[in-house]
C-alpha cells in the first residue's frame, strides 16, 4: 500500500468513514434498542426476560463471539495488503442488513436479533481495517489529533442523520390509523441509516490509499491459516511487552463500562425510566453534537497533560455519571438530558484518545493485525452488557444494573494509572515482521 503520512486528502477520506458508519451506530443506540423493547418485544417480555435484559445480553454475547474473528481478519488484511478491500466488503455487508432490519415484523424477536448480530458484525469488522489505517496516515506527533478528527466527523455526521430521523419521529403520531405512525417513522429511520452508511462509505473509499500488490493472492483457507498463525504468534509474544499488555487490560475493563452505557441507554430509558422515544432520541442527538466538541476538546487536553492523563480525567467523570443515573427518578426528562450532555463530552475524549494511545504503541507494519488483536480484547467489553443484563434479570430492574457499571470505570482507572506509555512506545522497535511472521528482536 502506498500511503502519504499527514496527507490532508487521505485524512479527510479516512475521517469520512466515521461520518458514514456513525449514522448506524447512533440509530442503534437511540432507536433500535428502544424500538426492540417497545415494538418487537410484544407483551411483558420474551423467554422470561424483559426486553431491556434480553437486548443487553444479546449485545454482550455478540461482542464475545466477534472477538474470535477480529484478529484473524486483521492479520489477513496486513499480509495481503488489502485493508481497503476488507473495509469495503464488511461495511457493505453491515449496511445491507441494516436495510433489512426495519422489515422484521413485530413479535419476531429471534429474527430481529439475528439481523442485528449481522449488522453489528459488519460494523465491527469494518472498523478493524478502518482503525488499521491510522498509524499509516499519521505520525506520532499528529496521531492524537487525526484520531480525534475521525471521531469528531463521526459525531457530527451521526448527529446530523439523527437530527433528520428525529424530525421524522416528531412528525409521527401515536394514533394507530395515522399515515405516519411512530413505529413506521422508526423503521424509516433505521432504513435510512443503512443508505447513509453506504453512500458516505463510497466517498471515503475514493480517498483512501489503494491496496498494494506486493503479496501474491492466496485462497481464503490459506489467508485464514496465515491469520491464525500470525495472531497466535503475536499474542504469545505480547507477554514480553508488559506495558502494552497492561494498557489492553485496562482498556478492556473501562471500555466495558463505556460500551454498556452506549448499548443499554436506550432500553434503560424506555424500560426503566419510562421515557418516550422522542426524548431518548433528543438525548442521543445532544450526545452526538457535544461529543464532536468533546473529541476536539480532549485532543487539546492531550496536548497539555498527555493522552493517558486525559483518559483518566474522563474516567473519573464516567464514575460520577453511573452513580447519578442510578438515582435518576422515573420520568425525569430533564435529568436524562442533563446526563446525556455530560456523556457526550467525555465519550468523545475516552474513545478518540484510547484509540490513538494504542496506535502509538504498536508497530506500523502490522497495524491491522494489532488493531484486530485490540478488537478481540475490546470485544471482551461485552462482559459489561452481560453483567448489566444478568443483574437486571436477577433484580427485575435496571437501576442496580446501571450502578454496576461504575465498577468497570473504577478498576479501569486504577489499571490505566499504572501504564508506562513511554516504555510501551519504545518497545515498538523490538518488533520485526518477515513473511507475515511476527518476531521479537
Image (spheres, rainbow, N blue to C red):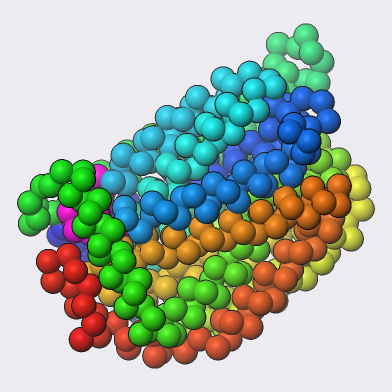
Reply above or below: 257 against 17.
below
- For the point 57% across and 61% down, which residue is it? 381
Left or right of 254? Residue 229 is left
- For the point 31% across and 52% down, which residue is it? 73
Is residue 240 on the magenta stretch?
Answer: no
| Residue sitting nearer the eye, 283 or 34 | 34
| Quadrant placement of the N terminus | bottom left
Is residue 77 on the magenta stretch?
Answer: yes
Residue 105 visible? The answer is: yes
In this rendering, the count of numbered labels is 0
Reply above or below: 66 against 321.
above
| Residue sitting nearer the eye, 288 or 260 | 260
Reply above or below: 167 against 295.
above
Looking at the rendering, which quadrant does residue 110 occupy? Answer: top right
Q: Which residues are magenta?
A: 74-85
Q: Measured from the top left, where is residue 7 in percent x and y? A: 25, 63
Amino acid at each position: 500500500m502506498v500511503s502519504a503520512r499527514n496527507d490532508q486528502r487521505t485524512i479527510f477520506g479516512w475521517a469520512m468513514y466515521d461520518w458514514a458508519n456513525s449514522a448506524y451506530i447512533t440509530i442503534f443506540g437511540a432507536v433500535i434498542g428502544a424500538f426492540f423493547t417497545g415494538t418487537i418485544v410484544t407483551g411483558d417480555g420474551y423467554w422470561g426476560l424483559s426486553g431491556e435484559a434480553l437486548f443487553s445480553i444479546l449485545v454482550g454475547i455478540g461482542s464475545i463471539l466477534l472477538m474470535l474473528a477480529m484478529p484473524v481478519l486483521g492479520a489477513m488484511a496486513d499480509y495481503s495488503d488489502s485493508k481497503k478491500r476488507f473495509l469495503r466488503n464488511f461495511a457493505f455487508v453491515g449496511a445491507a442488513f441494516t436495510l433489512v432490519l426495519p422489515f422484521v415484523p413485530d413479535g419476531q424477536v429471534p429474527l430481529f436479533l439475528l439481523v442485528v448480530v449481522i449488522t453489528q458484525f459488519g460494523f465491527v469488522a469494518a472498523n478493524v481495517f478502518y482503525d488499521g489505517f491510522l498509524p499509516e496516515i499519521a505520525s506520532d506527533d499528529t496521531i492524537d489529533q487525526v484520531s480525534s478528527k475521525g471521531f469528531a466527523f463521526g459525531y457530527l455526521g451521526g448527529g446530523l442523520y439523527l437530527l433528520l430521523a428525529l424530525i421524522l419521529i416528531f412528525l409521527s403520531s401515536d394514533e394507530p390509523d395515522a399515515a405516519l405512525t411512530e413505529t413506521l417513522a422508526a423503521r424509516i429511520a433505521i432504513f435510512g441509516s443503512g443508505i447513509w452508511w453506504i453512500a458516505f462509505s463510497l466517498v471515503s473509499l475514493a480517498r483512501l490509499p489503494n491496496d498494494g500488490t506486493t503479496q501474491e493472492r492466496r485462497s481464503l483457507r490459506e489467508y485464514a491459516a496465515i491469520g491464525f498463525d500470525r495472531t497466535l504468534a503475536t499474542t504469545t509474544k505480547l507477554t514480553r511487552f508488559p506495558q502494552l499488555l497492561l494498557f489492553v487490560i485496562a482498556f478492556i475493563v473501562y471500555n466495558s463500562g463505556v460500551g454498556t452505557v452506549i448499548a443499554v441507554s436506550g432500553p434503560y430509558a424506555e424500560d426503566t425510566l419510562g421515557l418516550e422515544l422522542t426524548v431518548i432520541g433528543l438525548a442521543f442527538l445532544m450526545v452526538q453534537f457535544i461529543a464532536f466538541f468533546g473529541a476536539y476538546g480532549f485532543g487539546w487536553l492531550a496536548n497539555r497533560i498527555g493522552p493517558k492523563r486525559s483518559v483518566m480525567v474522563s474516567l473519573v467523570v464516567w464514575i460520577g455519571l453511573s452513580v447519578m443515573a442510578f438515582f435518576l427518578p422515573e420520568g425525569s426528562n430533564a435529568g436524562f438530558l442533563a446526563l446525556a450532555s455530560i456523556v457526550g463530552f467525555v465519550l468523545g475524549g475516552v474513545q478518540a484518545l484510547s484509540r490513538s494511545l494504542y496506535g502509538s504503541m504498536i508497530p506500523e507494519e502490522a497495524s491491522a493485525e494489532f488493531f484486530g488483536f485490540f478488537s478481540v480484547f475490546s470485544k471482551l467489553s461485552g462482559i459489561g452488557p452481560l453483567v448489566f443484563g444478568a443483574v437486571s434479570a436477577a433484580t427485575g430492574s435496571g437501576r442496580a444494573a446501571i450502578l454496576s457499571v461504575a465498577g468497570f470505570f473504577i478498576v479501569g482507572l486504577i489499571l490505566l494509572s499504572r501504564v508506562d506509555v513511554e516504555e510501551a512506545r519504545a518497545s515498538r522497535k523490538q518488533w520485526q515482521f518477515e513473511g507475515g511472521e511476527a518476531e521479537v528482536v
